Structure formats: structure tokens, C-alpha cells
Image (tube, rainbow, N blue to C red):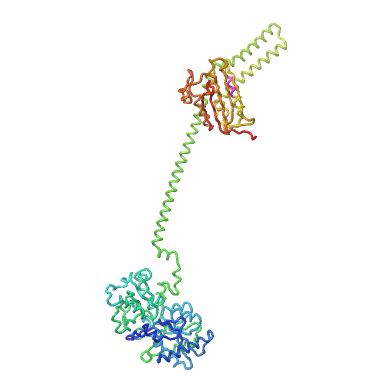
Amino acid sequence: MRERPGASVLSRMPAYAAAHALPGQRLDGRHSKGDFAPMKLVRKPHLGIALALATLLMWTCLPAGARQNDEIRIGVLDFLGSEATVSEWSPMVRRLEASLPGHTVRLARLDHSGMRAAVAAGELDFIVTNPGHYVELEAEFGASRILTLVAGHGRSPARALGSTVLVRADRSDLRALADLRGKRVAIVGREGFGGFQLMWGALAAIGLSPDEDFAALQTVGFPMSRVLEEVANGRADAGIVRTCMLESLGEAARSFRVLAPRAEPDFPCATTTPLYPDWPLASLRHTPPALGKQVAIALLSMDAARDGLAWAVPADYQSVHELFRQLQIGPYAYLREPTLMVLAQRYWPWVAGFAVVLLGWILYTVRVEYLVQKRTAALSAALAERDRLEASARDAQEQAGHLARLSVLGELSGTLAHELNQPLATIANYANSLILRADNGRLTDAALREATGEIAAQAERASGILSRIRAFARKRTAAREAVAPAELAGEAIALSRGMMARAPDITLLDTLAPGGVIEVDRLQIQQVLLNLLKNGYDAARDLPPERQKLELTLAAAGSRLEIMVRDHGSGMDATTHSHLFEPFFTTKPDGLGLGLSICRSIAEAHGGRLAADAPADGIGTRFILTLPGLQLPSP
């Protein structure tokens, strides 16, 4: 409210308020709902108290919303303390009751929340409050200003209110608003327009936040004199009050000093903030327009010199709206709702940190992707190179196998000639016999039939020998097929017998269950077995016939097939055994030393192995070919 320069501050001190408190009134001068009292009786305090109590009791007993039709209910913001508020607004009450005969004026002294509640409940016809509170009620309940208070003493209605920061006169360390950083500051409350919100705007203009930059923001409540007590007693470093309060203290003002005063022309009091319009008188939505007009006319006729109070036409409160919009409070509190831009401005260190982390993660991801692509390309190239090398190795192995077969054929060429010579000689003999018998006239049908039959049989024998040799020597691509082990061994034995001049006795011992198969390259395994049989034959060809015999055994070891070829030769020493499978190692004068090396490679290519050891009886040598994937029929 308006302050009169020179008025005693004692009327707003807690002791004075406590001594003259009305029933239902808090000692700090605030009222949660409001106390109504006839203002014309306040000149005699004790009588006024009694009548106020009676009036309050009557008002409480009335039904909600009930009142006399000639009653004018005015709510005023009580920030000075009850007695000071009564004294302040008594001229307005007297003028209205004098100008509107038959009407009773009832004044409700309320704090911010109490006035809002009373307006919401429809318990008031008019309100008198600070500009900030009015703007809030205007936006929420449609309050409409009809007059603005004239403060007097050279203050115009449009430039009447401001905030002042007071510090103790002996605080030389506080000279500017920036010096409040880290200090304790006392305020009436965050709802106070002149007691906090105006200074909040001034601090925001220089980049200070009361909540973040002050050591403490101490709320002391009404009356505003409590702020001065906190500063005087050292419990606060500074206090925020409305302008002209310091000038109203009289001698007590010497104990305080205004921090960072502004130069405001034609303004009689020191201020720390810009100036704003004075308090408005506002009507509410349910206030009868005729009553509003009568009240406005009556109050406009008041004279400050005669009545101690004056009113003017409504001032422009746009500056209050701009302040609230800047602070994002009141009707502009919705601006505090977090948006991306607001969050970015408020939490920019965190946003910057998150952006750095995100950028780092992106760069890391790009680098990892690049390395993965690079390694994938390298791996693909390595795999392609491996495939190429494996293909080359397979080609080389096939070429070596082919050469090995040709080598075997070369070693057996003499035997092959002997084998083919027998059927050819037989054919020639029978042919010559037929010619002689024909010349002598002794050719009978029986003799002709016998000779031609024998010629055909010997020709078929020679053709079979050549077919087996051609198939064995043919170069082709490796291909695996399911074959019976006994069939595979029998073909190898037949091939070896057809290629050897005096083929030894070869015994096949099949211990496998009937119906078993294994997936192998038929020709390659035949090559291994033929090579092993040929080596067994060579190891014992100079020994007695009983030691030239060979044994080929088929056995199962789990899911693996074991093919064992044993000879009864002279065996081998340790040196020969250690170099047995090395390329180009041989004990034969005309050997190439590739046969067993290629045989082991074929075994390993099938996932198996080829080994040699001495039999249990110590006679000869035993070669063991082990192949995986044996499939036996279910029992």
C-alpha cells in the first residue's frame, strides 16, 4: 500500500500488531480468508475490535453467498498489518458511505491466497491490491480495473511503485546489486510485487538468479517491517521492501542504506528498480456495472489534501505484463513449460556434454564401421586367397595322384605286358589251329566252336585288364559317393591281381556288419589300397611263397572305418619308419618316393589318417587306413 513519508514504523512492528490484533487475525497481520469490519469505527481501537468481532460472527453465521443487497464488499491486500491497513483505507470507506447513502461498506483484509480464494468464491465486489496480484486475478477471474490510486507527494499513478534493497548503513562491502551474490536476502514472500517481484526482474536483467546466486532467500511474511528486523539484527545481509518504506521510518532510517539507487526524476523516494503503476481498484465479473460506476464516481471526487487519499482513471499496466512475461510467472507461467529451446538454454552444459558424447559415439561408430568394412574386405580377400590356394592344392594333389598312378603303372609295365601276353598268345594259338585244321580238312563244327569260344574268352580277359588300367590311369576331378567298404576292397584286390605277373594270395577279412557304407572318392581310396598292396608284394616277392601272402582286413572303430593291409615281409627299421611318409623317400631302386606321401594326403583329405606299425607277431608290416563317416545299419 501507499506509504506516507514520516509515518512511524512502530504501527507495523510485531509487538504493536500483537497488542492490537483482531479476533481471527494472525500476529503477522495476514488473514487466510479475510476479516470484515466497519471501517468508520476504527478511530476507537477497543470499540472497533468489539464491533469487528460481532460483525465477523454475524458474517460467519450467514449462509454461503448471503449478504445484504446494499452491502459493498471490498477486499484489500493487507501487507502493513491490520491497524495500518484500517487507517490507510478508512478515507475510502467514509467517502463511499457518504456518497452512496443506504450502502454499507465492508472491508476484507486479506493476504494473496486469501484474496484469491475470496474472489473465486464470489465473496467480494471489488479488490484493491498491488499491480502484480491484480494482473494474476485479471487473467484468472476477469478482474477489471476501474481506478488507479494516486500516491501523492509528486508521484504520478503511472510511476508510483518500485522495490528498494536495504542494507545496514555500516555494510561497506555492499555497493552494487552484483555484490548480493552469495548473500542472505530477506523478503516478505515471492508473491510480493514491490517486496520481491520488481527486484527479481531487476536482478534478472543483470544475470542474477535469487534462487541460484543467493546464499539464502529468507521469506519472513507480513508485515513488511519484519524484513527490516532481519537486516537490522544481522540475520540477513540485505532486504527487499517497496519504495518509500525507508523514508517512512523517521530516525530509524539512519540505520539503513539503499543499495544501488536509481535516478528517477520527480520521484521523492529512493528506488533500486524502475517504477510501475500504483495499486488499482478493480471490479469483478459478477459486480453490477451500475455499482461499479457509482463507486468510481464517488472515489474520483476524493481529494488528497482534504480526504488523505485520491484516485485517478486507470493507468496502463502493460509494463507489469511485460515484467511477468520476462519472469514467466502469473498468467505467463505456462512459458516455464520445458521446450527444447528452454531446456537447451537452461541445461546447456549438460546439452553440450551430451552433444560431445553423441558426436564421439557417432565418430566411434563410423570408425568401427570403417574398420569392420576394412577387415571384412581383408577377410574376404583372405578367404578368396585361401579358396584359391585350396583349389591349387587340390589340383596339385590330383596331379600328384595322377602321376603316382602313372608311376605305379610304370613300375608294373612288365607285369602288364605278361598279363596281356597270355590271352593274346592263347588267341593266336587257337587261330593258327583253326587255319591248320581247315587246310587239312579236319575242321569240325565242335573244334570250330571250341576254338572261337576260347578266342572270345581270352579277348574279353584282355579287354578287362585294359579297362581297369585305363580307369585307374584316367585323370579326373575328385568326387565322393557312398560305397560299401567290401565292394571297395574287392575292386582294389581285383585290380592288383590283374596288374601283377605272379599276384600273391590276397585274403579279405570283412568284420563289418552287412549293409554298411562310407562316403569316399572311390578311385582315390582304390589308389591307396593298390599302392599298399603293391608295397606288400614288393616287400616279400623274393621270400618263400608262404610269406608272400597279403591280408586286407575291414573293421569298425566306432563311426570310423579301419582298413588294414598286412604283409609278411622283412619289415622295416626305425630309420625307415620315421621317414616312411616323407615325399621322395624310397627304399626301391626304381621308386619315386611319392606313393605313400600321396596316400597319406588322400587319407587326410578325407578327414582320416594313414599309419604303419609292426604286427603283434613281429613279422612284416601293417598299414592302417582310418576313414570317418562309417554308416552301419541299425541293429
Q: Residue at x 40, y 61 (%)?
A: 350
The answer to whether residue 47 shows anywhere in this view is yes
Determine the image quadrant of residue 566.
top right
From the top left corner, tell me how far across and down residue 147 is, in percent: 42, 85
**Count of marks overlaid on the render:** 0
Up/down of 431 relative to 474, above or below: above
Determine the image quadrant of residue 503.
top right
The answer to whether residue 40 shows anywhere in this view is no
Residue 291 placement, left or right of 260: right
Residue found at the very far front of the displayed protein: 617
State yes or no: residue 201 in magenta: no
Q: Nearer the viewer, residue 231 or 388?
A: 231
Classify the position of the C terminus by image quarter: top right
Q: Nearer the viewer, residue 406 or 2?
A: 2
Residue 509 placement, left or right of 100: right
From the top left corner, tell me how far across and down residue 315 is, in percent: 40, 82
From the top left corner, tell me how far across and down residue 610 is, in percent: 52, 28
Up/down of 281 relative to 517, above or below: below
Residue 604 placement, left or right of 238: right
Classify the position of the N terminus by image quarter: bottom left
Up/down of 312 relative to 231, above or below: below
Up/down of 193 relative to 456, above or below: below
Q: Nearer the viewer, residue 124 or 355?
A: 124
Q: Main secondary structure of the magenta part?
A: helix
From the top left corner, tell me how far across and down residue 133 is, in percent: 43, 78
Q: Residue at x 55, y 30 (%)?
A: 626
Instruction: Read off the magenta span.
Output: 492-498
Residue 183 placement, left or right of 631: left
Residue found at the very far right of the displayed protein: 445
